[in-house]
């Protein structure tokens, strides 16, 4: 017997930061997960902890480095953390830093941005996964739990009809999803803030404008557009569950449902995933 693939680290390190400017505050809230890979055979086979950087220390390192180094994007902070763990510990061959950022919006009153009060509650999170090993760092960025819905320009027709098919073809349905998108960058010295905003806007624009023949069709179109617009993106992966909205049967009450009244169902749901790559 021998040890196979193994990793260890601290998950869900919950960190908030106030960045205090003279006339206003910024507020950031992130969750960081550290996953380390390396030569840890003796740790497992002999209980030899001499090479173990405790997960508690990993957590403390994240808080301590946040003071100086979490000043910009989560990608930059992830790059700093991954570099720190790999360069200080020869036994660690790879550090993988995952960060999710919660969205807090500054309150606005009469067109004036409040200096230190925010609203939260949006499900959407910005994400990054930075992996550093002997080949250098790689940055994947993305977003998750972005709720999207459109009320037309979506249909689903011409699918297989067999003895178990009851689904009606439709040329006009609600398209709704809880989108997760991840894209891989080809470089690490990038304006991650500007790129994120451009890619997110592109995703929303394609979702809204696309004449969708299926979720799969829209997924591909979103990925294709991002790759056309952004040279520094190598590939785009999307997870787009189909959040079904089923027309409610009003005929039982002598009423006609002109595609106006629906029941949103939680489960089961269609689960559509795909990666769009360059040729
Ligand atoms: O966009 C869709 N893709 C499917 O594969 C599918 N299957 C289904 O029942 N409804 C849908 N909708």
Image (cartoon, grey):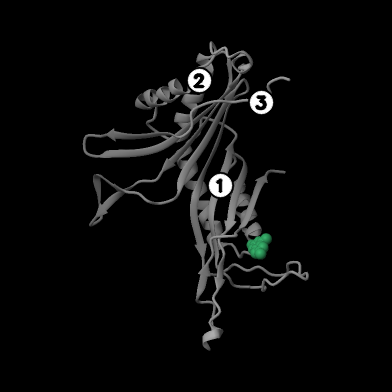
- Could you tell me which residue is drawn at 46 percent across and 30 percent down? 76
Q: Is residue 131 left or right of residue 68?
A: right
Looking at the rendering, the quadrant in which ligand 1 lies is bottom right
Which quarter of the figure has residue 183? top right
Q: Give the foreground label among 3 and 1.
A: 3
Q: Is residue 4 left or right of residue 56?
A: right
- Residue 98 versus residue 264 in the image, above or below: above
Mark 1 Cβ inside 8 Å of ligand 1? no
Which residue ends up furthest to the bottom in the rendered image?
A: 254
Q: Give the foreground label among 1 and 2.
A: 2
Determine whether the residue tagged by mark 1 lies in a helix, strand or loop: strand
Which quarter of the figure has residue 133? top right
The alpha-carbon separation of the residues under discs 2 and 3 comes to 19 Å
Mark 3 Cβ inside 8 Å of ligand 1? no
Q: Which mark is residue 5?
A: 3
Q: Give the foreground label among 2 and 3.
A: 3
- Residue 204 versus residue 279 in the image, above or below: below
- Could you tell me which residue is drawn at 65 percent across and 59 percent down? 217
Counting from the top left corner in percent of width and height, residue 255 is at 52, 86
Residue named by callout 1:
181
């Amino acid at each position: 017997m021998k040890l196979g693939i193994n990793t260890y680290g601290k998950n869900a390190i919950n960190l908030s930061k106030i960045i205090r400017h003279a006339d206003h505050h910024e507020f950031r809230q992130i969750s960081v997960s550290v996953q380390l890979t390396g030569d840890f055979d003796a740790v497992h086979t002999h209980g030899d902890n001499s090479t173990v950087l405790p997960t508690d220390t990993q957590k403390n390192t994240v808080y301590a480095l946040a003071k100086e180094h979490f000043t910009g994007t989560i990608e930059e902070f992830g790059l700093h953390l991954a570099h720190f763990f790999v360069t200080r510990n020869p036994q660690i061959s790879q550090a993988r830093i995952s960060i999710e950022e919660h969205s807090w919006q500054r309150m606005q009153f009469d067109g004036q941005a409040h200096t230190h009060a925010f609203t939260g509650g949006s499900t959407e999170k910005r994400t990054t996964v930075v992996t550093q090993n002997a080949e250098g760092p790689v940055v994947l960025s993305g977003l998750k739990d972005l709720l999207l819905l459109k009320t037309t320009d979506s249909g689903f027709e011409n699918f297989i009809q067999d003895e178990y098919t009851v689904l009606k073809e439709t040329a006009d349905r609600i398209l709704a999803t809880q989108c997760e998108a991840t894209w891989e960058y080809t470089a690490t010295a990038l304006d991650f803030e500007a790129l994120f905003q451009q890619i997110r806007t592109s995703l929303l624009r394609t979702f809204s404008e696309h004449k969708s023949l299926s979720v799969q069709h829209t997924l591909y179109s979103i990925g294709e557009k991002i790759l056309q617009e952004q040279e520094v993106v190598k590939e785009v992966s999307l997870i787009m569950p189909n959040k079904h909205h089923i027309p409610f049967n009003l005929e039982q009450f002598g009423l006609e449902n002109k595609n106006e009244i629906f029941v949103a169902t939680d489960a089961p749901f269609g689960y559509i995933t795909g990666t769009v790559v360059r040729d």
